[in-house]
Amino acid sequence: MKKINYYFVDTTVSKNNLCAKYKLVDFIFKEKKNAKEINFIFCKDDYLQRINEKYLQHTNLTDVITFDHSQGKKLIGDIYISVERVKENASKFGTTLKSELIRVMIHGVLHLIGYNDKSKVEKKCMRKMENKFLKRVL
């Protein structure tokens, strides 16, 4: 059974901003047919920063962290998203909250299915894939 869960830790996201989530779900399962369970956890900066420090030993703020818990060929993962960071980035980049939120969700899924963004080349590829799927979803 394929399942996508949405959790909210001390934050909310309006249904309007998540209205594209069903298309995103389709994208996830078409891109990676063996997807089993993906959890999106929406939270605040301080919550995600504690996770970043505890598990990745990073002290900086971030908008998204993906944890891959896959078992064999079954794709399972947790994607933590800071709603505060997404709001700030939407303002900074001159885009809507909805668009930036969906982009970050896609970004997390791309990490889960094997994309990286450590090098300039990887970042460019990741951004290209984000844009490709963002157009399909919105």
Image (spheres, rainbow, N blue to C red):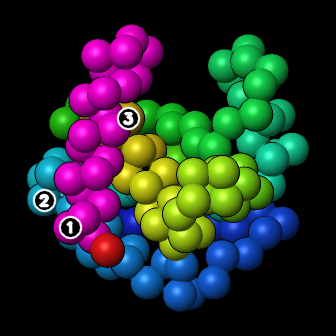
Between label 3 and label 1, give the one nearer the viewer. 1
Q: Quadrant of the C terminus?
A: bottom left
Please rate how many residues cluster around mark 2, counting C-alpha atoms within 10 Å: few if below 14, some from 14 to 19, many from 20: few
Q: Is residue 64 left or right of residue 68?
A: right
Magenta-colored stretch includes residue 122: yes
Does the magenta segment cover residue 128?
A: yes
Characterize the magenta stretch by its predominant secondary structure.
Answer: helix
* Residue 38 visible somewhere in the drawing: yes
- Residue range in magenta is 114-137
Mark 3–mark 1 contact, CB under 8 Å? no
Q: Is residue 102 above or below residue 53?
A: below
Secondary structure type for disc 1: helix
Identify the mark at residue 30; answer none if there is no mark. Answer: 2
> Which disc is residue 111 wearing?
3
Q: Which residue is at 78% across, 69% downward?
A: 11
From the top left corner, tell me how far across and down residue 99 is, in percent: 46, 66
For image coordinates 38% across by 52% down, the residue present is: 106
Which comes before the other along the chain, label 2 or label 1?
Answer: 2
Name the residue nearer the viewer: 62 or 114: 62
The residue labelled by disc 1 is 136
